Amino acid sequence: MPLSSGIKLGPYEIQSVIGAGGMGEVYRARDTRLNRDVALKILPESFSRDADRLRRFEQESQAVAALNHPNILAIYDVGHYEGSPFLVSELLEGESLRAVLDRGLLPPRKVIDYAVQIAKGLSAAHDKGIVHRDLKPDNLFICRDGRVKILDFGLAKLAAKQDAEPDGPTMTSHTAAGVVMGTVSYMAPEQVRGESVDARTDMFSFGAVLFEMVSGHRAFHRDTAAETMTAILKDDAPEIGDLPTPVAPAFERIIRRCLEKSPDQRFQSAKDLAFALEALSQLSGSKTGAQAAIQAAAPNPSRKLTFSAAALLFAAAMLFLGWWIGRASGVPASIPNYQQITFRSGYLGNARFTPDGSIVYNATWEGGQNQLYLVRTDEVGSRELQIKDAELLSISKTGELAVRVNSQNRGGYQRIGTLARIPLSGGSPREVLENVQDADWAADGQSLAVVRLVPETSHWRLEYPLGKVLFDSINWISNPKISPDGRLVAIADHENPDGDDEGSVAIIDLQGHEKKLSSGWTSVEGILWSPTGDEIWFSASNSGSSENLRAATLNGKVRTIANVPGGMWFQDLRNGVALMVTHQQRLNIRALPPGGKEERELGWLGWSYLRDISRDGTKILFEEEAEGGGPNYTSFLRDTDGSPPVRMSEGEARAISPDNKWVITKPLKSNSLTLVPTGAGQARQLTDESISYSTVRFFPDGKHLLAAGIEPGHGGRDYLIDVNDGKAKPLTPEGVVGTALSQDGTKIAVRDSGAQLGVWPMDGSGLRTIPGVDPNYRVIGWSPDASSLYLFSSRASERTGKIYQLNPSTGKIAFWKEFGANLLAGGTNVGAPRFSADGKAYAYVYLQDLSQAYTITGLK
């Protein structure tokens, strides 16, 4: 009988009924231990009467729970209630794919997006030996953020015997050969015959789902179950090309291969299928965008006739999507023309047009030194401009370059350095202004708009022209672009101080008033003014990190310019030609566990951002961003021995307690901190919204936190937070900030408003400065005996992580150790390591980026 609201099943309190079916009832429930809502599914009593079935249910539930993949429903717990087993999972908000399809055909880009996600989820399960056996639109859930979740893994194997309608619920029937399992219209031939099944069985079901997604009809639907099964065994699916809405031949071949009668002729794994779909769509799971053509190409006489295979795939995907979108809308689509400009392997930063239509860009090719290059669009290959370690920001109409030199990484996408000017004709950079992030020349070629950091307050400022402050914010801003008439400046307002590129597109007038045109993006990059000056063109993603091309009017009306597979970043626009850059990025983690001799790879879902390592070195805390982490990111705790990570909560990770029993996380769109148990217990909000905290560290007693924070109207400083009540009190004066806490908790390494390094004793005796330390060194910790400081070179030009030891008494600096020297090329950057209390175990992040530049015509 249905459960009433308020009934408790162990720690789970029933709130309301979600739905019911042949596999039991589903309820919304409250996990009173972890203070979160969950879905609780009561399975039929027949499960408890069959010991073998119950055992298999528990085994499969444990196996699925261990998958921990973003495209598979997360299983939290199993239990029993009055003789019936129940299963506890994450609570999803959204609707099934069946409900979506019942409303009509999906947009083509959604079909490709969903298909890739499903294939990746299946691949993760198949790698663990788990076959779904009942893949169908009813078991595919579309979350509100666009993520697809595969439901009910393994339950088809356990389903109760029942009569089935032609397209009815899961059915099973015993035969001499075995057991028939599945939903009739989506069964593979071997399921119909009652033969053994494997991963290729799911490929057939997936093909049937794909057919329905593009056609609106089931591939083998007949009037009765018997007729439907006969059709599956003997008939081919209808010709997709004969349907009212035909699909491209490449996609049709993928569907046909999935629907082959013989398992040997289908895709042999979901991984192969995902690869084929990604090759078609050029989708990417990277933080910054597209899976570009990354094969290096040497110039040769036949260059115009021999594009790389990756470039052909990219071009084919563009043509396919443009044609399909036009077909689906009934309006002839304007197909943009894409021309690849760069072909080498490595990281490409910014690119800009010169007045004569050539292109200047900065790049680090094949792991070499960052420098500026010049390329003509009618030629193959680039030439060096003999300007090293300069990052291009803007080019004036007179051909003068604004560049950033001596750049430092500040975390996330934040970089600051010294603004300098260089004539395109050559010469040495003339330094203009320090602590600059971005700059843009006005149309007159004389004035500059800049975004810069104010070290004294940790605020970000927009200045236009130089020296006139139009906008001041505690949050990071970037990408300033001056309107053609010089009356407005468009920016990306990232609405956080940490370097994450989420946020809004906004305009600032000459009186300093901000107007947000479009908000809520998980990633905002590449802002431009449209050719007519009445729109802001930008690259942004509303889920994950594949930034597509958008436009917003000055009244805030947003439209999509182009859904480029995997995304691109706008760079520049000249005479109707757009300059774009694609990035294939992956953020990984390497760690040396206690007593280990070799580093382990501990990255998880493609964008693993390391935040802390436990004092004993056995655990790391990180968050997954981009597609793998979801729109609100997800924090994970992982053992450094390589065991699968454990999900802690949504949001950003911050710190691990000394006893490893608690972690601090931060909701993505909140200033507050949350205390989360690593085992049994309840999570609770620790601090309020009044202070925006960035880096957080536990004191050795586990009862207090050291946090760098900032309040509106004040400069950044350190705070001491009581873990019991969440109350915070200022620890250092405004402008004195640092979170490098000694292992004994007696002192903190800080920098003052003049960027001078010093030591702040906890006994209140006051700041002791350490003169003469290069500000390009970043303090990351103390030696175990607190006699020396670890300094990390934060120069953007450094491709490895170099650690130095500083004696705070003498100011002497000595090289200690290098990290990441054996990593692959491709623009690799190594982040600052985190060390255990004894200094013997450590972990660090490293970034690999492969970029290419394109020009695009035909965008409107």
Image (spheres, rainbow, N blue to C red):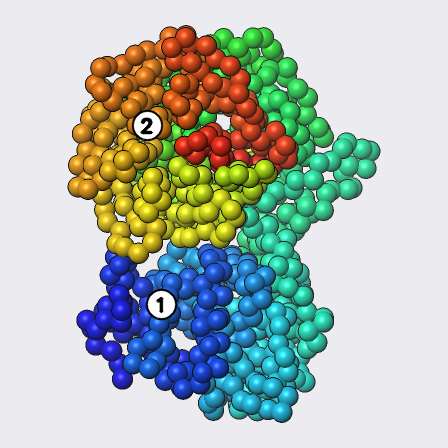
- Residue under circle 2? 744
Residue that carries the numbered disc 1 in the rendered image? 88
Q: Relative to 640, is 755 above or below?
A: above
On the image, the x and y values in percent for residue 282 come to 59, 50
Give the percent coordinates (x, y) of residue 178.
Answer: 60, 86
Residue plotted at (32% across, 27% down): 744
Q: Position of residue 396 (x, y in %)?
A: 50, 18
Q: Mark 1 and 2 residues: CB-CB less than 8 Å, in contact?
A: no
Asked if one can make out residue 653 in the rendered structure from this viewpoint, the answer is yes
Horizontal relation, residue 25 to residue 567: left or right: left
The answer to which of 836 and 736 lies nearer the viewer is 836
- The three-letter code of the residue at mark 1 reads Val
Q: Return the disc, 1 or 2, that comes first in the chain's sequence.
A: 1
Sort mark 1 into few (<14), some (14-19) or many (20+) by Cα contacts within 10 Å.
many
At numbered mark 2, what does the secondary structure look like: helix, strand or loop? loop
- Residue sitting farthest toward the right: 301
C-alpha span from label 1 to label 2 = 42 Å
Q: Where is residue 621 in the image (x, y as percent from the top left)?
A: 41, 43
Q: Classify 516 as above or below 219.
A: above
